Image (cartoon, rainbow, N blue to C red):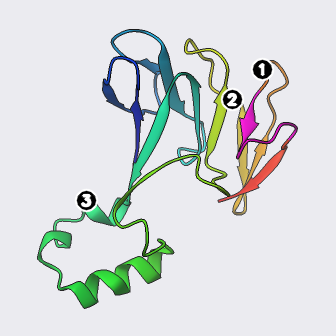
Amino acid sequence: MKLLFCPLCRDVRGLHYAEWRKCLCGESGGQYNEDNVTATIGGAARVFGIANPFFNELFPILETWQVEIVRKKWGYDDRRGECWWGEFGGDQQIMRIPSADGPRLVVRKDDGRVIIEDERTDYTIDGKTGVKEVHV
């Protein structure tokens, strides 16, 4: 799960597939892309992620060794734990645009790849421009 955090007003909003969401002050915004995995964020926004298995009803009662098995199965880095800041080096799930007003990027999912088909908006992925495909 990806959450939008505004460092200016300190508001937190859950990103959603169906609508572009903005913080209270309006300086940060974001939305899940159509693949429902990657997200477009804009303005001052920061994103933090919470591991999806964390929301499983059994997760709170797992022993430490069982949590490690879940982390390994889902490919979560042990150093990050269950919550981490997005846009870390190598993060290909966050697409940044300049404007807090949107829009989200147009993407297409194809066999573990996300192909960015949007030509209307300048964006960066992992700090790089011109990226046309990411692996998720």
Residue in front for this viewpoint, 115 or 14:
14
Please indicate whether residue 136 sits to the left or right of residue 64 in the image. right
Q: Residue, x 48% and y 72% (percent of image)? A: 77
Query: Which residue is pictured at 50% across the width and 27% down the height?
Result: 45
Q: Quadrant of the C terminus?
A: bottom right
> Residue 102 at x, y = what percent?
60, 17
The verdict on residue 124 being magenta is yes
Distance from Cα at disc 3 to Cα at disc 2: 27 Å
Q: Are marks 3 and 2 in contact (CB under 8 Å)?
A: no
Residue drawn at point x = 32 percent, y = 29 percent? 12
Frontmost residue, 45 versus 132: 45
Q: Residue at x 28, y 80 (%)?
A: 67
Q: Main secondary structure of the magenta part?
A: loop
Position of residue 95 relative to residue 88, above or below, is: above
- In the figure, 44 relative to 27: above or below? below
Dot 2 crowding, Cα within 10 Å, few <14, some 14–19, many 20+: many
Q: Secondary structure at mark 2?
A: loop
Distance between the alpha carbons at the discs numbered 2 and 1: 7 Å
Of the residues shown, which amino acid type is indicated by label 1? Thr
Q: Amino acid at mark 2?
A: Leu
Residue lying furthest left: 61
State the extent of the magenta-drawn residues as a range.
123-130
Report the disc number at residue 65. Answer: none
Which residue is labeled 2 in the image? 105
| Earlier residue among tags 3 and 2 | 3
Q: Which residue is mark 1?
A: 121
Identified by mark 3, the residue type is Phe
The label on residue 55 is 3
